[in-house]
Image (cartoon, grey):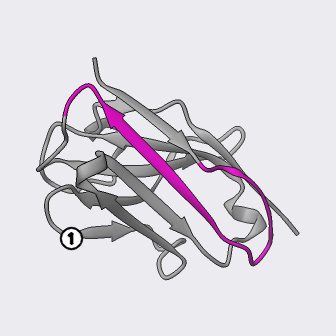
Amino acid sequence: QVRLVESGGGLVQAGGSLRLSCAASGRTFSGYAMGWFRQFPGKEREFVATIIWSVTTTYYSDSVKGRFFISRDNAKNTIYLGMQNLKPEDTAVYFCAARDQPGLSRLIHDYDYWGQGTQVTVSS
């Protein structure tokens, strides 16, 4: 059974940094894409970043480009989301996701597996 577990969320002041982790278990996602999404209260989940597992190819939403950085550690079957210069509007629940396809996607329905989410709160 595939399981994704996020960690690293918390409370940080505006301008600060956090690094989220997502550990995958149950199978290896080598060769497949994984991503990060976030959900604001009362809003639909939105795309943040995605990475191809086996090569260093990434894609970001415009709202986080240049501040957030997605990476992966194949040996640990883990992806990360480094977040810098955080803003109060980044406050959300952040979800890790994986898809059974190799191509990058920003679409929620293209992802097959989801973590439980981790809360990130940025105070002003």
Residue at 49% x, 82% y: name it: 66
* Residue 54 coordinates in the image, percent (x, y): 14, 59
In terms of depth relative to the viewer, which is nearer, 28 or 109? 28
* Residue 96 coordinates in the image, percent (x, y): 44, 43
Task: Name the residue at the bottom extreme.
Answer: 66
Compared with residue 102, is residue 82 higher up or lower down, i.e. above or below?
A: below
**In which quadrant of the rendered image does the N terminus lie?**
top left
As drawn, is 46 to the left or to the right of 59? right
Question: Which image quadrant is residue 18 in?
Answer: bottom right
Is 16 magenta? The answer is yes
Compared with residue 114, is residue 39 higher up or lower down, i.e. above or below?
A: below
Task: Name the residue at the front extreme.
Answer: 75
- Amino acid at the residue labelled 1: Thr
* Residue 84 coordinates in the image, percent (x, y): 61, 75
- Magenta residues span 8-27
Is 4 magenta? The answer is no
Magenta segment's dominant SS is strand
Residue at 46% x, 33% y: name it: 115
In terms of depth relative to the viewer, which is nearer, 28 or 50? 28
* Residue 19 coordinates in the image, percent (x, y): 56, 61
As drawn, is 14 to the left or to the right of 35? right
In terms of depth relative to the viewer, which is nearer, 47 or 86? 86
At mark 1, the secondary structure is loop
Residue at 53% x, 72% y: name it: 64
**In which quadrant of the rendered image does the C terminus lie?**
bottom right
As drawn, is 40 to the left or to the right of 34? right
